[in-house]
Amino acid sequence: MSAKRTIVVGASSGIGAALAQELSKQGHVLGLVARREERLDEIASSLPGEAFVLASDVCSKDSGTDFRRLVDQLGGLDSIYFVAGVMPDVGPKEFNTEKDVLTFDVNVSGMVRWLNPAAEMFQEAGAGSLVAVSSVAGDRGRRGNPAYGASKAAVTTYMESLRNRLSVQGVHVMTVKPGPVETPMTQELGALPFMVKPDLVARTIVKAARKKRNTIYVPGRWRPIMWVIRSIPGFIFRKMNF
């Protein structure tokens, strides 16, 4: 059986870099995408398997061209993982349009730019796997950082829509909802409840994708926790410090 050809978008650090390591160990030929080419080169050189590097900003209007070029280098595509994301520091009472628009540009528009062409390709092929990282922050509208939570809610709904459209075509679509992960994006937040390391998240994602799961929480304890939080009536939730 030939090696699986896989793109990881957001591969330069955190969960994306850990995913690259885990997928390479599993025999995938990788296309690594992020803005920092030097960092991608470092990661590619550390992998046990073959990897192609593409420096690309997910907000770029050239993403479609970049996608096709990377697929050509890989000789096709079997799966794609969208892990890119930003969470600008926003104060508890701050309304910062520039930061909020950037959050949606990267977390939502960037995802659409990379997953839409992959979804179309997989739909035509009747096979393939699409995976995107959302967050427990998208399960409920909280006081802190409204744009980040809303962007992750958009990721969750977009992936559910793709799943409903593509599952009948034989395409696997998986949504990943981590709690706090120890990455450069969260380092200013300090220690948070149930915080985990990127390599644990990566292993969980790869295992779940192999089993063709639909939606996973990482770690799994977040599933019952978020079920309770989603069940809290709005008039009560508004009074809670979330």
Image (cartoon, rainbow, N blue to C red):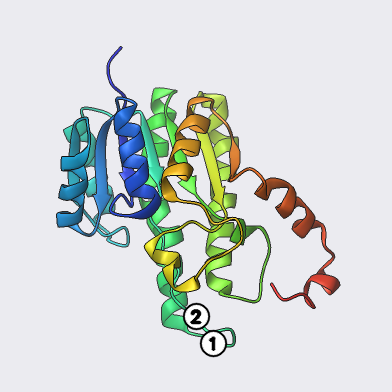
Q: Is residue 47 left or right of residue 212?
A: left
Residue 113 sits above or below residue 240 on the image: above
Q: Is residue 108 left or right of residue 233?
A: left
Residue at the spot x=23%, y=40% of the render?
A: 68
For mark 2, what is the residue? 90
Q: Is residue 69 visible?
A: no
Residues under numbered marks 2 and 1 in contact, where contact means CB atoms less than 8 Å apart: yes
Residue 81 sits above or below residue 48 on the image: below
Callout 2, which amino acid?
A: Val
Q: Which mark is residue 94?
A: 1
Callout 1, which amino acid?
A: Glu
Residue at the spot x=53%, y=25% of the render?
A: 211
Q: Residues within 10 Å of mark 2 (few under 14, many from 20)?
A: some
Residue at the spot x=20%, y=27% of the render?
A: 75
Q: Is residue 161 left or right of residue 25?
A: right
> How far across and how far down the image is residue 19, in percent?
37, 41
Residue 37 sits above or below residue 202 on the image: below
For mark 2, give the secondary structure: loop
